[in-house]
Structure formats: structure tokens, C-alpha cells
Amino acid sequence: MLQKIKETADFLRGKVTDLPKTAIILGSGLGNLVDYMEDKTVIPYAQIPNFPISTVEGHSGNLIFGKFAGKLVMAMQGRFHYYEGYDMKAVTFPVRVMKELGIETVYVSNAAGGMNKEFKVGDVMVITDHINLFPENPLRGKNYNELGTRFPAMTEAYCHDLVKLADTIAAEKNIRLMHGVYVGTTGPTFETPAEYEYFRIIGGDAVGMSTVPEVIVANHAGMKVFGLSVITDLGGKDITYVPTHEEVQEAAVKAQPVMLALITEMVARS
Ligand code: HPA
């Protein structure tokens, strides 16, 4: 694995002259952030040695290096989901490569179903913590001390200072910004009403099918994380309506301007 990470990082170093310290993993419908990047170097995943290939509709697969909000960044346009059949090492491989390239802060975004009764469709939620309900931890198996410690703490999986910065920016810009705990599950099924209710009872505010594996690995590697969820649908025992993938995408696209405004300022100021 160490060899593969180095090989992929070397390949990418050969493609870009200046390496960024910030990475952004773009979730559902948020790919438009790349339209605001300048001096782009676009590298399709298919050309990157050891990279898995994204398969799900609506997620194109490119690694994009360039300038965003005045900073050098690398953006993942399309991520690898566990439900697609990739194993956890594949899902989190790009995060390992980020660390090897010198990334210090990882921004993640996703679409999620809201269980918190205060939430409305289209709300943006800062992820303050998560509950890992994936059946497998990406760190299971041999630990490479070069990559991180065997038993990493997860007490500040989402950087508290970055959450505060988001609150400051939201207040300045009059953005309704929710806080919450993200429950990560495998999918690809959306939840039954009883499952949404269960996730609420155990302390979740929103549920989705990504992010948790990448965040665990980013923490293992000692990178700071900031996460945003777009609430694309609501679930609970009194809500029997379950969204389609298209409706989730549509709701995510509607929240794009707010997400973009927040992330732009966050990157500019951090
Ligand atoms: N459940 C799980 N994942 C999701 C949801 C949901 O309701 N909405 C968007 N991603």
C-alpha cells in the first residue's frame, strides 16, 4: 500500500508544479465548484495509477488542481462510495495520496437525509461529529506507522476552529447554517422510516452514504477536516416519503450557491 501511495503521488507531482495544502472532496451536485477554479490541471481518475474509477450517475471522476479563492487547491470531482462495491482501502486511497502530497486540510461535502426536526430541505449543515455505521472501518488490518497511529483519537474528527470560522462567515453572510452529527451508512437503500427514527435516537441529525471513511483516514493521517452536508430530504417515523436519486441531486444543486459562498470564504480565510 505504501508503495502504491508513493507511486500515485509521484505521478501527480509530475503533472503539477505547485502543490496545494487544501483538498476539497466534492459531493453530490456540488461539482460546480470547479467552474470557479482557475489555472486548472484536470486529471481523469482513469489516467491516475492505482486510482479506482467512479461509476455512479452524477459523479464524474477527475482530480483537479488549480486556484480557488486565492489558494492552491486540489479538488476531487466524484468520490468512491462503499455501496459501489469498492473496499474501504479503495474508498480512502485518494485521501492517503492527499497526505503524501502535503495536504493539511480536507473539505468534504455530501448530500444527506435530515432527521433533526428543525431541518428543512435545502438546509446546509456543518458536520460537527459523525457516527460510523459502516460495517467496516477503513483502518482495519495492518497499521502502517508511517501513515498514522494504530488507535487514533476521533474526539475532534471535524476541526473545531473551522466550525467556528464557518459560523462567523454564516453570520456575516446571513446564511442559515445548521450544526449536526452525520450518520454514515453503506446505502444504497435510503432508510426506512424506522431507520431514520433510530438514527435520530442514537444522536444523528443527518444520514448519508459517504464521508465517514474519508474522514477517519484523514484524521489517522493527521489532516484537519471540515464537512458540509446539504439536506436533500427528510426522514422520520411520520415521514414515509422516500426520495429518488434525481430529487436528491436536484435539492443539492439548489443549495449550491450557499455551499459555494461558504466554502469560498472558508478556503480564503483558513
Ligand atoms: N439517506 C441516505 N443517504 C442520503 C439521503 C438519505 O435520506 N439523502 C441523501 N443521501
Image (cartoon, grey):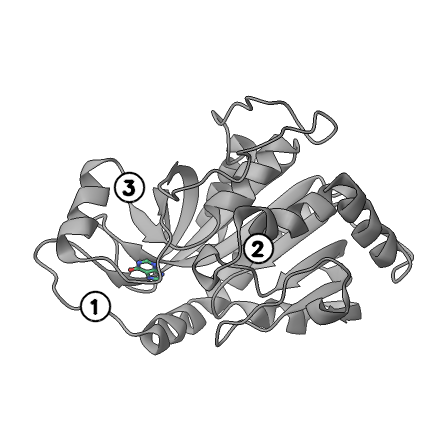
Q: Label for residue 173?
A: none
* First-in-chain label (2 vs 3): 3
Q: How many marks?
A: 3
Residue at disc 3, secondary structure: loop
Query: In this orientation, which residue lies closer to the viewer: 8 or 249?
Result: 8
**Counting other residues with Cα less than 10 Å from the Cα at mark 2, is it few (<14), some (14-19), or many (20 or more)?**
many
Q: Quadrant of residue 205?
A: top left
- The residue indicated by pointer 1 is 242
Residue 135 in view here: yes
Image spot of residue 65 (x, y percent): 77, 62
Vertical arrangement, residue 219 with respect to residue 212, above or below? above
Image spot of residue 82 (x, y percent): 47, 55
The residue that appears at 14% across and 56% down in the rendered structure is 193
Q: Report the amino acid beneath label 1.
A: Val
Q: Label for residue 204?
A: 3
Q: Mark 1 touching mark 2, by CB under 8 A?
A: no
Vertical arrangement, residue 195 with respect to residue 76, above or below? above
**Counting other residues with Cα less than 10 Å from the Cα at mark 1, is it few (<14), some (14-19), or many (20 or more)?**
some
The residues bearing labels 2 and 3 have C-alpha atoms spaced at a distance of 23 Å
The residue that appears at 73% across and 65% down in the rendered structure is 64
Residue at disc 2, secondary structure: helix
Residue at disc 1, secondary structure: loop
- The residue indicated by pointer 2 is 263
The residue that appears at 51% across and 33% down in the rendered structure is 157
